[in-house]
Amino acid sequence: MKEILLLKLGELVLKGLNRSHFEKRLMKNLAWRIRHFGEFKIYCMQSTIYVEPQSDDCDIDAACDAATKVFGVVNISRAAECEKDIATIISVAKEYLASSLSSAKTFKVEAKRSDKSFPYKSPEICFEVGGALHDAFENLEVDVKNPEVCVRVEVRDRAAYVHANPIPGAGGLPVGINGKAGILLSGGIDSPVAAYMMAKRGVELFGIHFFSYPYTSERAKEKVIELARLVGVYAGNIKIAMVPFTKIQEEIRAHCKEEYFTIIMRRFMMRIAERVALEKGCGALITGESLGQVASQTMEALGVTENGIDLPVLRPVIGMDKEEIVTIARRINTFETSILPYEDCCTVFTPKHPRTKPKLEYIIEEEKKLAFDSLCDEAIENIEII
Ligand code: ATP
Ligand code: MG
C-alpha cells in the first residue's frame, strides 16, 4: 500500500498571487526540512500539499515529524493512496485504519469527491464505506457529532486517499513570506522564544549575538549556536553574527556612571544590531524583552534603548509572563539549553542599582564620554558570521 502525507495549509485568507507565493515557499521550506529522509515528490493541489515517497527506503515517519514543525501547515494526515474504486477504498480503509478503528468506540466517515466522474457522490461514499466499516468492526458505533475516529475518503483527480484523525501542524505562516529580521539572540530563555514566535509569523531570521570574551566563555558562544540550531528546527537555518563586545563594555565601565551601564550597553547593542541587520537585508529587529521583567525593560528604559535606531523593534514576548515564556521554551525544546549556567555579557557588568526610569537627556550626555561611533565600527569590523 502506498502511504503519502497530506498537508493542509493555514490562513488561506491570502489570495491571488500571494497564495501561490505562500504555497511555493512552504514547499521549498518543507523540501529542505525533509531532504535527509529520502526522495519525495512534493506538489500542491486544491490547497493541499502532497508529499509522496519516491522509493521504498524513504523514512516517512521522520518526514511526518519534520512536517509538524514547518510553519504554514495546519494539520498533517498520513494517508493511504488507492485506486478510485469503491471496493478498493473499502478494503484499504479496513486494513489501513485497522488499529485505530478496532480500539475506538465511535466513528464517522466524511467524503469529498473532487473528481466528479467518480460514480458515487460524497454522501453515497460515506454510506458505503461507513456501512462496511460498521460491519467489519463490531466495537464501532456511528457518532456524527464527536467521533473518536473520523475516517476521511477523498476522491481526487489522480487517486483516492483514505486517512483519519490528522496530526496538528505548527500553524503560522511559511518562513520567508514576511521578510527577514535580525534577532538579538542571548543565551537566555526569552530570546529563543521570541525568535520562534516571529518565525511562526513567516519571518526569516538572522541572529546577532554579543559576547565579551574573556568575561564570557567559548561555551557561552556554543550555547547560543545550539539555541539557534534548536530554533532552526522550526525557523530553518539561522546564521549568527558574533559581535565582540568586550571593549565597549570596558569603555562603558571606565567612563560612565554605574547606574547607566546596562542601558548604555543596550543602546550600543541596538545600534550595532541595526547596522548588521540592514546590511543583511532585514526589515526589523527582534528582542526577547518583556515589560517590567528587569530594570532595563521598563517602559522608559525600552524607549531609551530603541531611541537612535530607525528599524522597527519587534518584541513578541513583551506582554507575556515568564511562566508563559518558559512553557513555550519547553515545548520548542530550547529551555534545557537556555538554563545552562554560562555568563551572558549582559550579566557581566550589571550595576547594583540600575535606573528603572532613565532620562534620555542624561544618557545622551553620558554617552558623549565615549567614542560611540568608532567603538561600533570596530565591533562591526570584527564580526564573525557562523
Ligand atoms: P533571560 O531569559 O535571562 O531574560 P534574555 O535573553 O531575555 O534572557 P535579557 O537580559 O532579559 O536576556 O535581555 C533582553 C533581550 O536583549 C534579550 O531577549 C535579547 O533579545 C537581547 N540580548 C541580551 N543579551 C544579549 C546578547 N548577549 N546578545 C544579543 N542579544 C542580547
Ligand atoms: Mg529576559
Image (cartoon, rainbow, N blue to C red):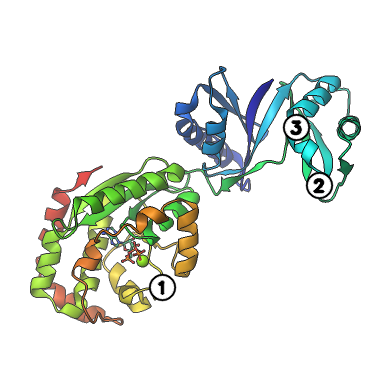
Q: Quadrant of the N terminus?
A: top right
For the point 22% across and 57% down, the residue is 272
**Looking at the picture, which amino acid does disc 1 mark?**
Leu
Could you tell me residue 385's position as x and y percent?
Answer: 23, 43
Q: Is residue 349 left or right of residue 44?
A: left
**Residue receiving disc 3:** 97
For mark 3, does the 10 Å Cα neighbourhood hold few (<14), some (14 to 19), or many (20 or more) residues?
A: some
**Mark 2: C-beta under 8 Å from nearest atom of ligand 1:** no
Q: Is residue 352 left or right of residue 156?
A: left
For the point 46% across and 63% down, the residue is 325
Most foreground residue, 98 or 349: 98
**Residue receiving disc 2:** 147
The reply to whether callout 2 and callout 3 are in contact (CB within 8 Å) is no
* Residue 278 visible in rendering: no
- Measure the alpha-carbon separation of dots 2 and 3: 15 Å
Q: Earlier in the sequence, mark 1 or mark 3?
A: 3
Residue 362 lies, with reference to residue 371, above or below; the image says below
Residue 308 lies, with reference to residue 184, above or below; the image says below
Most foreground residue, 333 or 74: 333
Could you tell me residue 334's position as x and y percent?
Answer: 41, 52
Q: Is residue 233 left or right of residue 81?
A: left
**Looking at the picture, which amino acid does disc 3 mark?**
Leu
Give the foreground label among 2 and 1: 2
Residue 227 lies, with reference to residue 134, above or below; the image says below
Q: Earlier in the sequence, mark 2 or mark 1?
A: 2
**Residue receiving disc 1:** 291
For the point 53% across and 19% down, the residue is 57
**Regarding mark 2 in the picture, which secondary structure is present there?**
loop
* Residue 259 visible in rendering: yes
**Regarding mark 3 in the picture, which secondary structure is present there?**
loop
Question: How many marks on residues?
Answer: 3
Q: Quadrant of the C terminus?
A: top left
